[in-house]
Amino acid sequence: MEEWYHSFRGVLIHTGTAGLLVMGVLDASLIPTPGGQDLLVVVLAAAHPEWWVYYALAGTIGSVFGASLTYRLGRGGGTRELDTRLSHRMHTRVSDVFERWGAGALFLAAILPPPMPMAPFLLAAGALGYPWPRFAAVLTVAKAIRYAAAAYLAAVYGRRAVVALLAQDYRIVLLAAVALGSTVWIAMIAWRRYHDAPRAAER
């Protein structure tokens, strides 16, 4: 299975943008995809540094498209879909976290690199009736930040440097992603409250 996956991933790398769209669907599913979309973005951006913004954008679009399919799967099956696709322990944990933190949980699941699981939160968002426009907006912002950072680093330092960083200093990358994601999330909340304040005063 692992050899087949690596061969398939190599084919996707050679297809460029189309490969990012296909891997985006797989990466957002419950199918294990080690490296997944991140590795494709890094390899392509390192090979064509002048196109790093394009590959970050294509990676984001592919990932959000794949995430939307998983969301629709959860939306169609409801909580029964969670029972079918997830273990009881995972179902309970994901549902509790999502009901408590909502978009914040979804944002962190999308921006943090592996082994942070994302697919269970996508299913939960659909099963628990989270609004799709908000779902798509949160995923787009998180994935854009994640893939833009990966593509830029690959374009500047090369593929080997980025892969080595992920392998050797994973905690630093994790903390940096959390700090960046938290900053953006706080800014989004502040912006929303600022624009909602006049409406609340009028009522």
Image (cartoon, rainbow, N blue to C red):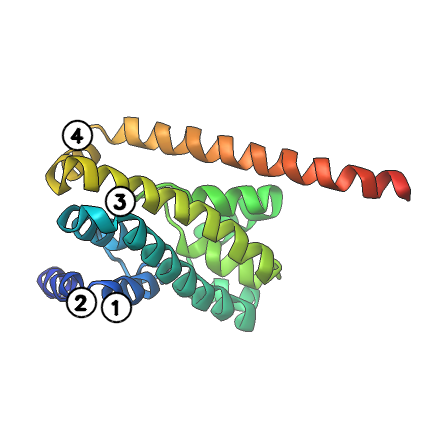
In this rendering, the label closer to the viewer, 3 or 4: 3
Q: Could you say where residue 132 lies in the image, as x and y percent from the top left? A: 58, 62
Q: Secondary structure at mark 3?
A: helix
Q: CA distance from mark 2 to mark 1?
A: 6 Å
Instruction: Name which of mark 3 and mark 4 comes first in the sequence.
Output: 3
| Amino acid tagged 4 | Gln
Q: Which residue is mark 1?
A: 18
**Residue under numbered circle 2:** 15
Q: Which residue is mark 4?
A: 168
Query: Mark 1, residues whose alpha carbon is within 10 Å: few (<14), some, or many (≥20)?
Result: some
Residue type highlighted by circle 3: Ala
Distance from Cα at disc 3 to Cα at disc 4: 19 Å
**Residue at (16% x, 39% y) in the render:** 163
* Nearest to the observer: residue 184 or residue 174: 184
Which numbered disc flags the more N-terminal residue, 4 or 2? Answer: 2
Dot 3 surroundings within 10 Å: few (below 14), some, or many (20 or more)?
many
Q: Position of residue 167 (x, y in %)?
A: 17, 35
In depth, the one of 17 and 28 nearer the eye is: 17
Dot 2 and dot 1 residues touching (CB under 8 Å)? yes
Quadrant showing the N terminus: bottom left
- Asked whether the beta carbons under mark 2 and mark 3 sit within 8 Å of each other, the answer is no
- In the picture of the structure, the residue carrying the numbered disc 3 is 151
Q: Earlier in the sequence, mark 1 or mark 4?
A: 1
- 94 in relation to 190, above or below: below
Q: Viewer-proximal residue, 151 or 183?
A: 151
- Residue 176 shows in the view: yes
Disc 4 is placed on an element classified as: helix
In the drawing, does residue 133 fall left or right of residue 71? Answer: right
Residue at screen point 31% across, 59% down: 27
Is 185 placed left or right of 112 in the picture? right
Q: Earlier in the sequence, mark 1 or mark 3?
A: 1
| Gap between marks 1 and 3 measured at Cα | 17 Å
